[in-house]
Image (tube, rainbow, N blue to C red):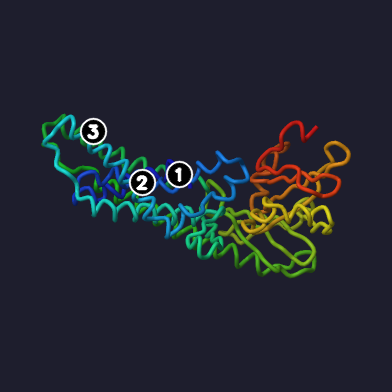
Amino acid sequence: MEPVTHFLTGACLGRAGLNRTTALATVTMTLATEMPDIDIVAYLGGSVTGFQHHRGITHSVVGAPLNAAITLALVYGMFLWMRRRNPATTPPRWGLLFLYAIGGTLVHIFQDLTNSYGVRPFAPFNPKWYSWDIVFIIDPIMLAALVCGLALPGLIALVTEEIGEGKPRFRGRGGAVFALVCLAVVIFVRDLEHRRALNVLNSVTYRDEDPLHASAFATVWTPFKWDGVVETRDFFQLVPINSRSGELDTSDEQSVIFKPEETSVTLAAKKSRLGQVYLDWAQYPFTEVVGRPRGEEYLVRFTDLRFASMSRSRPGTQPVLAGYVLLDPALHVEDMFMGTPPKDVLQ
């Protein structure tokens, strides 16, 4: 999920009752539920290194205590600042905050599991990727519920204070619990509709070929529309599907993507560091030679068809989460990168 959802989820968890057990519980949960994304620092080593380590050890069960320790270090700094301003500030229960921070990290991993990018929760011992594919990276219903759950209690408190009622020591618990229940309901409904979509995808024959592998990926606005990807022996097919009606359209010839022939060029690209990392992550990898930039070199592109519909909705844009390997005439790797290739390569 995107960072805002993680932050707001942590804040709701804190205000749902954890803040009644120790001081600084809410700020700890807010920071902890976003802390796994600290792996963004890996991109300082370049796009390939960043991609390789994204959702790695910081998004694993093994890394949860490390995330919790970093979170507590930040919270401890806040506590020292508060104590400097008010020496009478009561210390929180640090051991309990550490457990809460571990829980916040695990919540983050669970939320990322629900979308299509996936996580490696058992790394480094088991580097396998897992993804539930039921929630888009941004879910407007979840965001709205979280914002309302946190904001409405404050507005209600303003009204009650205006009419002279006392200010409660802890407020916002009801709104936070409501928001978290809404998140659970969204996940339940999306999982149910996801199962229906998969059943329909696997019950259809595509161009007289049975599906070898079929997946349904969430769209942003509704739990009833899914982006289906089906792999057969000879081709892939992109199939939009409505899980509520069971309708899917297999007539669009442009949605059929035939598997390219393997060549020495694509094999060399797959042996590169980017190729190995990409193929380990991709569910529906598609490798193709997209050009010879200076007449002698080869530019090989890696894409994952589970994100193909996102690119097709914006004609003229580069594929989402694509990787590129530049090979010299002898098929040695000259360069590799994630995202849009540099302009001097495209020329």
Per the image, the residue denoted by label 2 is 70
Q: Which residue is mark 3?
A: 81
Asked if the residue at tag 3 contacts the one at tag 1, i.e. Cβ–Cβ closer than 8 Å, the answer is no
| 264 left or right of 195 in image | right
Where residue 68 appears, x then y in whole percent? 35, 51
Mark 1 residue type: Ile
Identify residue for label 1: 38
Q: Position of residue 304 (x, y in %)?
A: 67, 53
Q: Residues within 10 Å of mark 1 (few under 14, many from 20)?
A: some
Q: Position of residue 61 (x, y in %)?
A: 42, 60
User: Closer to the camera, 335 or 196?
Assistant: 335
Given the image, on which type of amino acid does mark 2 rest?
A: Ile
Q: Specify which label sits upstream in the sequence, 1 or 2.
A: 1
Q: Which residue is more in the foreground, 174 or 258?
A: 258
Answer above or below: position of 113 versus 161: below
Which amino acid lies under the numbered mark 3 shown in the image of this protein? Trp
